[in-house]
Image (cartoon, rainbow, N blue to C red):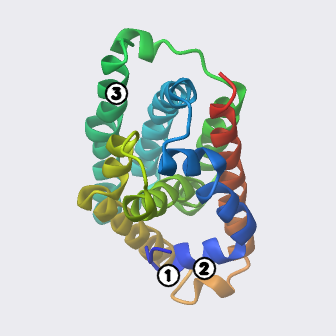
Amino acid sequence: MSDYGKAFTLMRDTAQGPWRDYTRHAFVEGMKDGTLPREAFLHYLRQDYVFLIHFSRAWALAVVKSETHDEMLAASRTVNGLISEEMKLHIGICEAEGIPQDQLFATPERAENLAYTRYVLEAGYSGDLLDLLAALVPCVMGYGEIGTRLAVEATSETYRDWIDAYSSDEYQQACYAVGELLDSALTRRIGANFEASPRWDRLCQTFRTATELEVNFWQMGFTP
């Protein structure tokens, strides 16, 4: 498992079952060995593009919830990475499969997608930066872990573009930056011993719920 900071590691440890179900899901293992049906992958990719639109908005909300210039910079860099790089990956793969960008943007949003993205946004609307980050980091770090593992374990080149994107140095650095943001935001608002705070359990529950919604998102990929 990757070390993306103290708080993330502690949160992941409190959600070991859901985290395993998420990062070792059959959809992920199908990308690893190439057995994942292409139709399922493209269905997932289209939904994930819609997800990233809302995820970018949630990270933009993190700028609003920031209390320091460094926090604003970290959040804005993540927004830029999502819009400029990660969404571009989806556009490129889909265009190669005959799905133009305007059609991709118009993809109807599945209920599983709606539930996850609105949960994350609501965490930010109703809470502070900590509540929002607890809902955001499972996606960021989970894909980082999956990409790193599949880069080593993959026995097929079928989904190499996706694996390379999330195992890349650029994406891994983004994961470390988000881990640093989470640690510093917690320390600023709660203190260095943040895991002893009365808020900690609630933040961990938010992390766990977002992780469970990631599991549902993978499962949705199997049902075009």
Foreground mark, 3 or 2, reads 3
Real-space Cα separation, disc 3 to disc 2, in angstroms: 35 Å
Q: Are marks 1 and 2 in contact (CB under 8 Å)?
A: yes
Determine the residue positioned at 47% across, 63% down. 145
Residue 37 left/right relative to 148: right
Picture coordinates of residue 23 (x, y %)? 59, 58
Examine the rendered structure and indicate whether residue 200 appears above or below residue 48.
Answer: below
Identify which amino acid the numbered label 2 is placed on: Leu
Picture coordinates of residue 152 (x, y %)? 38, 65
Q: Earlier in the sequence, mark 3 or mark 2?
A: 2
Picture coordinates of residue 218 (x, y %)? 63, 41
Q: Are marks 3 and 2 in contact (CB under 8 Å)?
A: no
The residue that mark 1 highlights is 6
The residue that mark 3 highlights is 93
Identify which amino acid the numbered label 1 is placed on: Lys
Determine the residue positioned at 62% across, 71% down. 12
Determine the residue positioned at 50% across, 81% down. 6
The residue that mark 2 highlights is 10
Q: Earlier in the sequence, mark 3 or mark 1?
A: 1
Image quadrant assignment for residue 219: top right
Classed neighbour count for the residue bearing mark 2: other residues with Cα under 10 Å, few (<14), some (14–19), many (≥20): few
